[in-house]
Image (cartoon, helix red, strand yellow):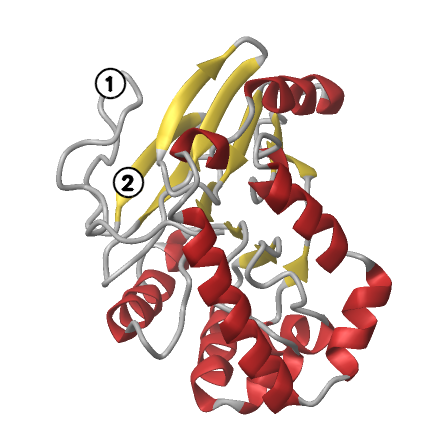
Amino acid sequence: MTLSKTLFISDLHLSPADPATAQAFQRFLTQQARHASQLYILGDLFEMWIGDDQLDDPFYAEVAASIATLAEQGVAVFFMPGNRDFVCGTRFAQAAKLQILTDPSVITLANRQRVLLAHGDAYCTDDVAYMRFRRIIRNPLVRMIWLALPFGWRNRKAGQLRQQSSAMNRNKMRSIMDVNAAAIENALRRAQVDTLIHGHTHRPARHQEAAGTRWVLPDWYAGMGGYLQWQDGQWQMLTLNDTPLLDDTGKSLPDSLPPAHQWSE
């Protein structure tokens, strides 16, 4: 008996500035994802999302339409907002014909295995400054005020915030921008699962934690990227060329990752 195929991706950071990745995503939707039963997008699908009126831009409207086409072909699509696109709302969900998930969420696979899904930034608890900023911008009142502001102002302000964040991250130790081990263990135990899938850190790997297995999804850049596949009870992380992305120890294989680029929150 063949069980359903489920795919997981995150951190595509789609924008007109990286057309190669946008094209790679279009191919992924018509090739690998077309043969899946479910596709889970775990945040940062877009480089920046300042409100659903961003769909007025043809680039973003085309992305939503492409996802909708996949859904119309019978693939269930789920989207968990990340730190770059957490204000994706109802209009986007309807345009893309997907279901928005809360962060974190527990899903049940076809073999009844329960899996914890998260974007991943909530586990970077060592980065105190970022966690403080996250609490502020995720406040419902702040979100309401933000979305009420003119599109042009939001667009300019978001660009300024991105520049400030990149500048700050250049002065941070890489270790504090990774997930905290205790936060991961607490999340697994609280959800009562032994498998966690997340993105955000741009450090694809398979980690064996005290409380279970943690998969870290790859980011996409310059047309390169990858995805995690579950099928017939087996897990595999693959490049967009469908070659293994990890070695037997769970570490990234050489030349399997996008070209080096600035990691930023």
- Give the CA distance from mark 2 to mark 1: 13 Å
The picture quadrant where one finds residue 196 is top right
The picture quadrant where one finds residue 257 is top left
Q: Which mark is residue 163?
A: none
Between residue 14 and residue 247, name the one nearer to us. 14
SS at circle 2: strand
Going by the numbered disc 1, the residue's amino acid type is Asp
Between residue 3 and residue 173, name the one nearer to us. 173
Query: Which residue, as the protein is rendered here, is positioned at the far right?
Result: 141
Reading the image, the residue beneath label 1 is 248
Residue 97 visible? The answer is: yes
First in sequence, mark 2 or 1: give its number. Answer: 2
Q: Position of residue 147 (x, y in %)?
A: 74, 78
Between residue 92 and residue 145, name the one nearer to us. 145
Q: Residues within 10 Å of mark 1 (few under 14, many from 20)?
A: few
Q: Is residue 53 left or right of residue 70?
A: right
Disc 2 + disc 1, Cβ < 8 Å: no
Reading the image, the residue beneath label 2 is 238
